[in-house]
Image (spheres, rainbow, N blue to C red):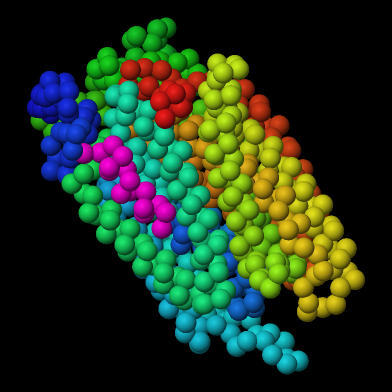
């Protein structure tokens, strides 16, 4: 039977120390440690993420200027188009994670959705070239003509193809990268810790190239050239990714985690009236000792799913014998996996607002920059390129934290830096201070705008915006790495891709919340008018600062409640400390 086959495979793995446990090569044979995976395999995967960031951020940071200047949309409507595009991109990460876990596997998911993104970017390049797909330029005394439904429809098709590609591949890239390292081997487990830091560095590098080189090409050469370059770069990255097929390690799918969660919930609901046994030892368990997750007393209502009710729990198995029906009876380990996911949710909910604040950096902050003096000598900085300070703050924060703070902290206190929950808290605090700085800066800008002539750049330097970019950028460095570490190390091993998707939905919901807040504030107040110089954007920033402070208080309560991940031989979380020691 299948059990005997798995035992033979397990013994073949344990007999040969050069074979990687729980991983296979492209032929389906046990993966050889010396010829597959590790940094050689992970490096080929990272190129896809670099090109994804280049395209998505290159489009997002400069899209608001295209919508206002070329498509003639009002400022608030343009901001909502951008945040809806980014929100959908990250929301579709959950779909990508589900498809990877349940059907396609991470390798195929990455290859297919990277092609979808390249197609969407290529179509966007074509759509920005065709004159009939945008309204005529403003001129004379006649009012500017807003883009038609057809013109906006074509733009939306291109944008949401890109969003589908981004969402499909993004949740699988980090998971497939970590699949290249064997967590049962000390050296490779330490390398996996370094991979997280370098992976985020590559994301930041892609964003840096997007907001400098790509934005410059959009503004001074042409948008179609910039988008065409993104499409070509992604095709090259796909070719490099596919060339590494023989070098990769592949993990067998254990089925859809969403289905597993639903099975526990359904089984627990069906048996809610049954009396639970006094000891956990009498609950159902079908996993071998080394793969079990120990029972915990939290969320006892879910334990009903593992209460044995005799023959009514069974169904006829494939071999004609009675076997447990997973919709009626679940193992203790399966129930504990669901409990681990439930424990993530309070922290998940209280990190959404950070990404609402982040959304302002690529929408209203860019719109602020378009009205200000952006000259350095004879060179005028593109408005969207101001986000270089944002990305610079991320990279500088990561470098200082990794190379200065961690060694110093280890020497003084014996601790290897901040925990993932502390990092998230620091990120939330910095975002609130960033919004306060943004509100003060906007008040000064509006004071200058009230006395300036229409149609000219305001006599106020664009570098006034730098504090808000630096503060929110440094906040992102802490919160992104803290969230990624928290969601991957505190979720079940079999739900790694889904937990990454769950983390990325906080970004998605943050962008959607931004769109909803903008629409709500615009409907209820006069703070967000059609033109930024006749609005009170500073009030909107103060509102976000106050909401951020309330959210921080809620987060601190959730962080105190959050308990360490359930420990077992099967679910040993990766500890950043060990990785930092060996990097």
Residue 302 visible in the displayed image: no
Q: How far across and how far down the image is residue 504, in percent? A: 49, 45
Q: Position of residue 292 (x, y in %)?
A: 32, 18
Coordinates of residue 575 in the picture (x, y in percent)? 44, 24
Task: Give residue 250's quadrant in the image.
Answer: top left
The C terminus sits in image quarter: top left
Q: What residue appears at the point 43 percent right and 78 percent down from the top-left corner?
A: 126
Q: Main secondary structure of the magenta part?
A: helix
Q: How many marks?
A: 0
**Between residues 265 and 149, which one lies in front from this camera angle?**
149
Residue 170 appears anywhere in the view:
yes
Q: Is 507 above or below relative to 69?
A: above
As drawn, 492 above or below 473 = above
Q: Residue furthest top?
A: 278
| Residue 507 as seen in the image, left or right of residue 446 | left
**Residue 316, quarter of the rendered image:** top left
The question of residue 269 being in magenta is answered with no
Residue name at image x 76 percent, y 57 percent: 464
Q: Residue furthest front?
A: 377
- The answer to whether 469 appears left or right of 48 in the picture is right
Q: In screen coordinates, is 269 left or right of 62? A: left
- Which residue lies at the image location 12% right of the left edge and 20% below the top edge? 15
Quarter of the picture holding the N terminus: top left
Query: Is residue 40 part of the magenta span, yes or no?
Result: yes
User: What residue is rendered at 30% in x and 58% in y?
Assistant: 238
The region drawn magenta spans 36-51
- In this rendering, position of residue 382 left or right of residue 328: right
In the image shown, does 473 or 381 lie closer to the viewer? Answer: 381
Residue 342 location, x and y as percent?
A: 49, 30
């Amino acid at each position: 039977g299948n059990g005997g086959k798995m035992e033979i495979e397990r013994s073949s793995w344990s007999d040969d120390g050069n074979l990687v446990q729980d991983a296979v090569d492209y032929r389906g044979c046990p993966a050889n440690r010396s010829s597959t995976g590790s940094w050689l395999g992970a490096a080929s995967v990272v190129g896809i993420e670099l090109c994804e960031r280049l395209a998505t951020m290159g489009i997002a940071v400069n899209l608001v200027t295209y919508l206002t200047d070329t498509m003639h949309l009002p400022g608030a409507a343009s901001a909502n188009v951008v945040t809806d595009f980014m929100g959908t991109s990250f929301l579709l990460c959950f779909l990508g994670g589900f498809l990877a876990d349940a059907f396609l596997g991470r390798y195929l998911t990455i290859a297919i959705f990277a092609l979808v993104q390249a197609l969407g970017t290529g179509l966007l390049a074509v759509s920005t070239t065709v004159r009939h797909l945008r309204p005529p330029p403003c001129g004379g005394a006649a009012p500017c003509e807003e883009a038609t439904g057809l013109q906006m429809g074509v733009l939306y098709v291109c944008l949401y193809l890109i969003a589908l590609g981004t969402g499909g591949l993004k949740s699988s890239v980090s998971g497939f990268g970590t699949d290249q390292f064997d967590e049962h081997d000390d050296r490779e487990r330490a390398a996996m810790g370094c991979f997280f830091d370098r992976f985020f560095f590559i994301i930041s590098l892609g964003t840096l190239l997007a907001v400098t080189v790509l934005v410059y090409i959009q503004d001074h050469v042409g948008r179609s050239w910039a988008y065409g370059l993104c499409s070509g770069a992604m095709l090259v990255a796909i070719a490099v990714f596919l060339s590494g097929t023989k070098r990769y390690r592949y993990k067998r799918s254990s089925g859809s985690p969403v289905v597993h969660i639903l099975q526990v919930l359904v089984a627990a609901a069906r048996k809610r009236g049954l009396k639970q046994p006094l000891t956990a030892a009498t609950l159902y368990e079908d996993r071998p000792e080394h793969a079990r997750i120990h029972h915990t007393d939290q969320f006892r209502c879910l334990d009903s799913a593992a209460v044995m009710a005799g023959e009514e729990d069974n169904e006829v198995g494939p071999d004609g014998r009675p076997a447990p029906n997973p919709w009626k009876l679940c193992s203790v380990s399966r129930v504990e996996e669901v409990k681990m996911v439930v424990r993530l949710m309070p922290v998940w909910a209280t990190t959404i607002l950070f990404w609402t604040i982040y959304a302002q950096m690529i929408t209203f902050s860019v719109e602020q920059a378009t009205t200000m003096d952006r000259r350095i000598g004879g060179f005028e900085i593109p408005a969207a390129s101001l986000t270089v300070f944002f990305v610079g703050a991320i990279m500088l924060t990561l470098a200082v934290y990794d190379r200065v703070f961690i060694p110093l902290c280890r020497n003084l206190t014996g601790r290897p830096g901040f925990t993932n929950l502390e990092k998230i808290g620091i990120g939330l605090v910095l975002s609130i201070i960033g919004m306060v700085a943004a509100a003060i800066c906007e008040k000064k800008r509006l004071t200058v705008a009230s006395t300036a002539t229409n149609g000219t750049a305001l006599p106020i330097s664009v570098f006034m915006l730098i504090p808000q970019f630096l503060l929110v950028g440094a906040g992102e460095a802490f919160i992104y790495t803290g969230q990624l570490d928290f969601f991957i190390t505190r979720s079940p091993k079999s739900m790694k891709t889904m937990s990454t998707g769950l983390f990325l939905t906080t970004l998605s919901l943050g962008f959607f919340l931004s769109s909803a807040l903008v629409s709500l504030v615009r409907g209820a107040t006069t703070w967000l008018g059609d033109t930024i110089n006749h609005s009170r954007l500073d009030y909107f920033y103060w509102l976000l600062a106050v909401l951020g402070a309330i959210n921080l208080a809620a987060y601190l309560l959730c962080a105190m409640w959050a308990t360490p991940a359930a420990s077992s031989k099967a679910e040993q979380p990766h500890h950043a400390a060990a990785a930092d020691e060996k990097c």
